Amino acid sequence: MAPTAAHSCRLVVSLLISAAVLRPGLGLYTVNSVYGDTIVMPCRLEVPQTLMFGKWKYEKPDGSPVFIAFRSSTRKNVQYDEVPEYKDRLSLSENYTLSISHARISDEKRFVCMLVTEDNVFEAPTVVKVFKQPSKPEIVNKAQFLETEQLKKLGDCVSKDSYPDVNITWYRNGRTLEPSEGVITTLQRQVDPATQLSTVTSSLVYKTTKNDIKIPFTCSVIYYGPSGQRTIHSDQAFFDIYYPTEKVTIQVLPPKNAIKEGDNITLKCLGNGNPPPEEFLFYLPGQPEGIRSSNTYVLTDVRRNATGDYKCSLTDEKSMIASTTITVHYLDLSLNPSGEVTKQIGDALPVSCTISSSRNATVVWLKDNTKLRSRPSFSSLQYQDAGNYVCETNLQEVEGLKKRESLTLIVEGKPQIKMTKKTDPNGLSKTITCHVEGFPKPAVQWTITGSGSVINQTEESPYINGRYYSKIIISPEENVTLTCTAENQLERTVNSLNVSAMFSYSVFHLSLISALGCSQVSIPEQDEADDISDENKEKVNDQAKLIVGIVVGLLLAALVAGVVYWLYMKKSNYSPKPCPQSDISGKSEKAAAQKFQTHLRTASKHVNKDLGNMEENKKLEENNHKTEA
């Protein structure tokens, strides 16, 4: 290191001395020229009147002169001496200015202009300096990598074809690298014998650290030109810094909070060194011996028992270790009962949905794809409880971890029947309804007792929650008994209802017609009660007896009055007056008489029917009572 420093100091001193010598005004005239250009040297002497001729010469290192050009003042001719190195390169003008083309390093000499008279010789010396700018410096022979805390050659900085000699400086991140324990430079110069140009090489040995990662290194060449000192910088160079691993880390893919049973787990071990370690030891839960592998280790189709601590370390330094805890999430669901379950109406059915999971799970109940507010509970099953139930649970933190079980509940029941009747407000028809419950859906059939004929013209409601009704509309001319039969796979149920004939005119009304002389009226029959309660049955029976007595008395009175009235009208040709709100429109007496006789016969028949219906209604109420029970 000491010889290099001494050489640099000598070079600087030499250049300073040269600059002082060449500075104008110190006795010598200097011409600075660029390598390859034309050197122009004026004579710098006043031409005397008695000039005979002028000559140029240069001085060898030993001081001996070499004449190179001659010009006569009278003949105006120019002669060039036979000097090989200046052949065809010289030009002497009329004012005795000498030009040398294609400047070379060898042209650095002391030239003298001589003007000769008869009695004297005048001389003017000129010093020629030639400069060659070096090529852009380049860092070559770069190290493939540098290792921390180790001295290693970083590279060579080369500058070619320079004159005079140049200096090379190294930089780290733009700052000069000063010689130190970790920075060593050596300088070499090679001169081309033909051109006398120099190639300068500076080698740098460097001790790197981790701080040099991604840091640029450059070098520069400092040279002198005609106008003074100049600097040229090289391109930046980056180096791969090797350093040992100081820390080991372990990664889990996919992320640890999303691992569930059935997943594949990849363990990845990383060292922070450069280059990174290529092999590691992996330690699984409950296994003290490590498994040698590359920087990854794969676990396939993991189960919940894979939960635990996982570690990895360097193969050559087991104390440098990293660990992580993995939880394999799971979710179990048990629905009891499940599948298809058939129960009878009124039965109790306990339902439980048991969840076992690695974290708290949310539970949702659905019935026929509709969310329920609470867990279903069946203490007494009804038809509306039937449906498809789903117990669904999931772990919100773990994507894709969801379970569900279903229960298809079927509620069966034997057919149950309840019959009702209602008279139309206009008194022309009666509506008989058969209310049916049961599952599977019972089939309903209407028949007329006695004749056994089937009634097909029925109207049915939608079947909802095990219930629907079937109804018919009739206008019986005589008392009938209707039978409703409901049948499903479990049982056949039958119920009957007595329906009285439609009667538009009561005996009382006929008496009124006779008294008022009306030929026809329209008086609606009162609605029959659909249902009679037990407490009113005795009262109804008493009223029926009273009505029978009244009807018989009225019938006898009507017959007598009718005969008298008929005889009277026949003798007096009396025309009856229209009755209030009657539907008679001026019919003949004969038609009125025939109408009245028909009413008498009809009234007689209905009196007999009413007497029979009293007993039938009593039996009907008893039958409905038994059915409801």
Image (cartoon, rainbow, N blue to C red):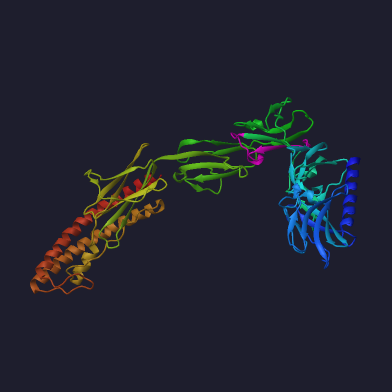
Q: Is residue 278 above or below residue 427?
A: above
Compare residues 51 and 265 and report the one nearer the observer: 51
Q: Residue 185 colored magenta? A: no
Image quadrant for the C terminus?
top left
Residue 530 shown left or right of residue 39 in the figure: left
Q: Is residue 255 above or below residue 45?
A: above
Q: Residue 254 colored magenta? A: yes
Q: How many marks?
A: 0
Q: Is residue 199 above or below residue 45?
A: above
Residue visible at 89% across and 56% down? 21
Residue visible at 21% across and 54% down? 477
- Residue 478 in view in this figure: yes
Please state the horizontal and vertical placement of residue 174, each as a whole percent of the image.
Answer: 79, 51
Please state the horizontal and vertical placement of residue 361, each as a whole percent of the image.
Answer: 61, 42
Q: Quadrant of residue 444?
A: top left
Residue 197 shown left or right of residue 503 in the figure: right
Please state the horizontal and vertical placement of residue 144, each as a whole percent of the image.
Answer: 73, 37
Compare residues 384 and 56 and report the one nearer the observer: 56
Q: Residue furthest top?
A: 289
- In this picture, which residue range is highlighted in magenta? 242-264
Q: Quadrant of residue 118?
A: bottom right
Compare residues 604 and 394 and report the one nearer the observer: 394
Compare residues 64 and 391 and report the one nearer the observer: 64
Please state the horizontal and vertical placement of residue 53, each as a whole percent of the image.
Answer: 80, 61
Q: Quadrant of residue 182?
A: top right
Image quadrant for the N terminus?
top right
- Residue 378 in view in this figure: no
